Image (cartoon, rainbow, N blue to C red):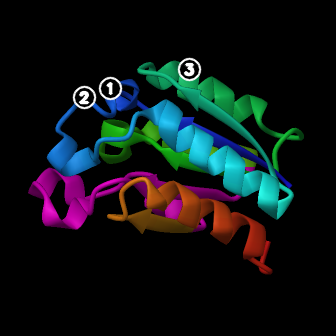
Amino acid sequence: MKILFLNGPNLNLLGQREPEIYGSLTLAQIEAKVRKHAAKLGAEVDFRQSNSEGELVSWIQQARGSFDLIVLNAAAYTHTSIALRDAISAVGIPTIEIHLSNVYRREEFRHRSMIAPVCKGVISGFGANSYLLALEAAVNDTRK
């Protein structure tokens, strides 16, 4: 199984940015944990991060035929991006939306996800473990 992990704006600042909300691990440290666990599960992973909505859309479009599943932490674009929603719908690749923080315990504007309705599922609030839970869900889901 090949899984594409896409990370949106400001996730390149993990480890520095509001560690009380997002934790103290960097994105590279999270990626290393996921890669290690993926190897045990026999899954291939590709990690990418961009602050650009257009680049994220392009990566989703290019994933067709190359990846079995997408794990997407769209960060702030979760709440605003119809373009990401449309790209997920267009490619037809099962997608799992993830968040480090529990968005429902935060500001009201974070309670609405534009992409959740076109995703297979949502994992929110488990810090770096949200990535590992998404990996487990991707590999173990028999309803692919």
Q: Mark 1 belongs to which amino acid?
A: Leu
Which stretch is magenta? 92-120
Pick the front one: 15 or 60: 15
Q: Mark 2 belongs to which amino acid?
A: Gln
Q: Name the residue tied to disc 1.
A: 13
Tell whether 22 sits left or right of 124.
Answer: left
Q: Is residue 93 visible?
A: no
The residue shown at (77%, 79%) is 143
Q: Name the residue tied to disc 3.
A: 55
Q: At which x and y percent is residue 2?
A: 82, 48
Distance from disc 1 to disc 3, alpha carbons, whole Å, reads 18 Å
Q: Name the residue tied to disc 2.
A: 16
Where disc 1 sits, the SS reads: helix
Which residue ends up furthest to the left in the rendered image?
107
The residue shown at (60%, 40%) is 32
Q: In terms of sequence position, does the residue under pointer 3 or pointer 2 come before the other?
A: 2
Where disc 2 sits, the SS reads: loop
